Image: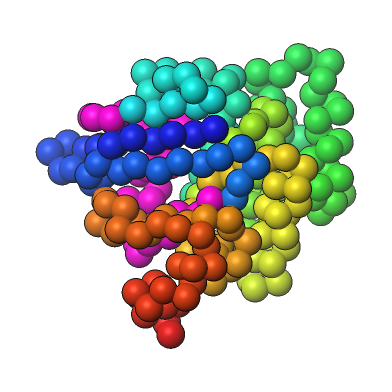
Amino acid sequence: MLKVEDITCRYGRIEVLHGVSLQVAHGEIVTLIGSNGAGKTTLMRVISGILPQTKGRITFDGAAIDRLPAHVRVVRGIAQVPEARQVFAPLSIADNLRLGAFRRRAADVPREMERVYALFPALAARRHTAAGTLSGGQQQMLAMGRALMSGPRLLLLDEPSMGLAPVLVDQILDTVVALRKDGMTILLVEQNVNAALAIADRAYVLETGRIVLSGESMSLADDPRVREAYLGL
């Protein structure tokens, strides 16, 4: 579904991605792991169109998208749940969800909202509450729900467990697995490496802007380099 080939990206004169390549097949959960500052969020922003690459090619379902603006990539079926949630704090839960549905027909929006509420019952009970008053876990649910409102086929999840209590981390990651069972394809950046490898089909390890390891998640979990660097074993 997604093919990233030899991507480089700069912040001014500083190159932060150096020839990154990866692939995500239909129906997979693929996780991207690495230490802080490795370039994981930068890569997600390049894929979603928020940042331009300086070199390389991105294809989605066989069509080049690397010159398309971010909102057109959403229309094509790519949605990103950003790091640190970035909900619209003064707006209600319901209004945040409506903003995520900009590409949908107005008649479809109420049905899609009910699907999100079924996935996240905690949001349904507070649908008229300002997003800025929600807990971190509820804001993460809202950010995911807002992305789902666009009807994506590929969901980019950037650090969904950041700052959450363990019980909420389990709930969010269980939701990721449920989405995959419903046919969603997911590229996951996750600081909880153990949990990410447990739910993903395949994984890539990014270090200082380069892919240094890749393979099936369970094989990487047993790799001494990953166990020492990321699993604390």
| Residue depicted at 63% across the width and 71% down the height | 165
> Which quarter of the rendering shows the N terminus?
top right
Counting the numbered discs, the total is: 0
Q: Position of residue 42 (x, y in %)?
A: 35, 44
Q: How is the image coloured?
A: rainbow
> Which quarter of the rendering shows the C terminus?
bottom left
Q: Is residue 137 above or below residue 130?
A: below
Q: Which residues are magenta?
A: 30-56
Q: Position of residue 82 (x, y in %)?
A: 51, 44
* In this rendering, position of residue 127 left or right of residue 27: right
Give 71 or 57, whichever is nearer the viewer.
Answer: 57
Give 117 or 77, whichever is nearer the viewer.
Answer: 77
| Residue depicted at 60% across the width and 26% down the height | 77
Whether residue 157 can be seen here? no
| Residue depicted at 40% across the width and 48% down the height | 41
Q: Is residue 155 above or below residue 36?
A: above
Residue ranking furthest to the bottom? 233
Which image quarter: residue 215?
A: bottom left
Q: Position of residue 157 (x, y in %)?
A: 55, 47
Q: Position of residue 148 (x, y in %)?
A: 69, 36
Whether residue 99 can be seen here? yes
Give 7 or 144, whichever is nearer the viewer.
Answer: 7
Q: Is residue 81 magenta?
A: no
Which image quarter: residue 163?
A: bottom right
| Residue depicted at 35% across the width and 59% down the height | 213
